[in-house]
Image (cartoon, helix red, strand yellow):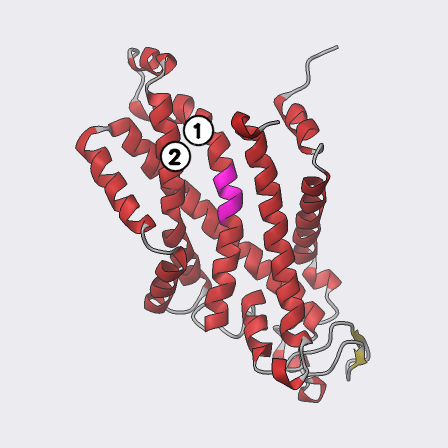
Amino acid sequence: MSEASPVARFWAEFRDSKVAVAALIVVVLMIGLALLAPLVAPQDPYDLANLSLSDARRPPGFVGSGGYTHWLGTDAQGRDLLSAILYGLRISLEMGLVAGALAFAFGVALGIGAAYAGGRREAFIMRVIDLQLAFPAILLALVLSAMLGQGKLQLIAALAAAQYAYFARTAHGAASAERGKDYVEAVLSTPLPPARVVWRHIFPNCLPPLIVVATVQVANAIALEATLSFLGVGLPVTEPSLGMLISNGFQYMLSGRYWISIYPGIALIVLIVAINLVGDRIRDQVNPRLKR
C-alpha cells in the first residue's frame, strides 16, 4: 500500500479537530454564498431602480412591494438585508483575499530578500519594517485610506500597505534560519543565480509559518476593511460591504430597528472567527512545539 501524500496526511490530522472542520465548512459555505449571490439573493442591492423607500426599515419577515419576503428585514434605503449581506460578503472577501495576496507577495519578497542579502541592506530593511510594526495597522490603514480616497483599488492598496510588514517579518525570520543550513550553503557553492536559490530552495521551506500568517492576515484585512467602511473612509456607498451595512443601521439601534446593524455584524463576526479557527488549527499542525 502506497504511503499517503503530504496533503492527505495534513487533512487527516486537520479533521481530528471537529471545531476546525466546522469552521472550515462555515468558511467554504460563506464563500460559496458570496460567489453565488446573484443567483441566491432575491434582490440586486446595487440596482437603485428596484429599491423602494416604502420598503425601508421594515422588520424581518416583511413582504415588500416586490412580492417576496424580506427574511432579515430591510435597511434605510429599502434594500433586502439578506441580499445586501450576501453581496457585502463578496466585497469583504474580495478585499481581504486580494489585499492579503498583495501583502503576502510584497512582504515575502522583501523579507526573504533581506535575509539573503545580509549586511547593511538587511539591517536597513528590517529597521524600516520594525518601525512600521510599531504603529497599529488600523491607524496606518486609516491614514492611507484618507490620503488615497475611496474606491476598491485605493482600499486594497491601503490594506496591503498596512499589512505587508507582518509577512516580511515572518519571512525574514524563517529565511534567516534556512540561510544558515548546510543545504543552502551547498547550493550557494554552485553557479546557480541568486533568484533560483531563493525561490526554489529557501522559499518553499519558509511556507509553513507564512501560511499561518496568511490566514490570520486575511481575517484581519476583512476586519480592517469593515472598520474603514464603518468610519466612512472605505468603499463608496454604491458598493456596501458588511462594515458599511453595519454603519448604515447604527443610527437606528436605539429606535428598535436592530436588524439593520445586527445581522451584518453577525455575518462579519462568524466569517472572521471561522477563518481564525482554521488558522489556529493550521498553526498547531505546522508548529511541532504546539502538537500534543
Question: Whole-percent x and y of residue 34?
Answer: 66, 57
Given the image, on which type of amino acid does mark 2 rest? Ala
Q: Residue at x 33, y 22 (%)?
A: 179
Magenta span contains residue 15:
no
Q: Is residue 57 visible?
A: yes
Q: Residue at x 69, y 52 (%)?
A: 32
Height in image: 255 above or below 149? below
Q: Secondary structure at mark 1?
A: helix
Q: Return the residue nearer the eye: 128 or 136.
A: 136
Q: Secondary structure at mark 2?
A: helix
Q: Residue at x 35, y 33 (%)?
A: 172
Looking at the magenta stretch, what is its main secondary structure? helix
Question: Whole-percent x and y of residue 171?
Answer: 39, 34
Q: Return the residue nearer the eye: 121 or 95.
A: 121
Q: Residue at x 52, y 75 (%)?
A: 237
Asked whether the residues under the numbered discs 1 and 2 touch, taking CB atoms below 8 Å apart as contact, a structural biologist would say: yes
The picture quadrant where one finds residue 166 is: top left
* Gap between marks 1 and 2 measured at Cα: 7 Å
Horizontal side, residue 11 vs residue 173: left or right: right
Give the labeled residue for mark 2.
Answer: 171
Given the image, on which type of amino acid does mark 1 rest? Cys
Horizontal side, residue 91 vs residue 206: left or right: right
**The magenta segment:** 212-217
Height in image: 144 above or below 277? below
Give the labeled residue for mark 1.
Answer: 206
The picture quadrant where one finds residue 128 is: top left
Counting labels gives 2
Name the residue furthest left: 120
Name the residue furthest front: 292
Question: Whole-percent x and y of residue 46?
Answer: 61, 73
Height in image: 72 above or below 99? below
Q: Earlier in the sequence, mark 1 or mark 2?
A: 2
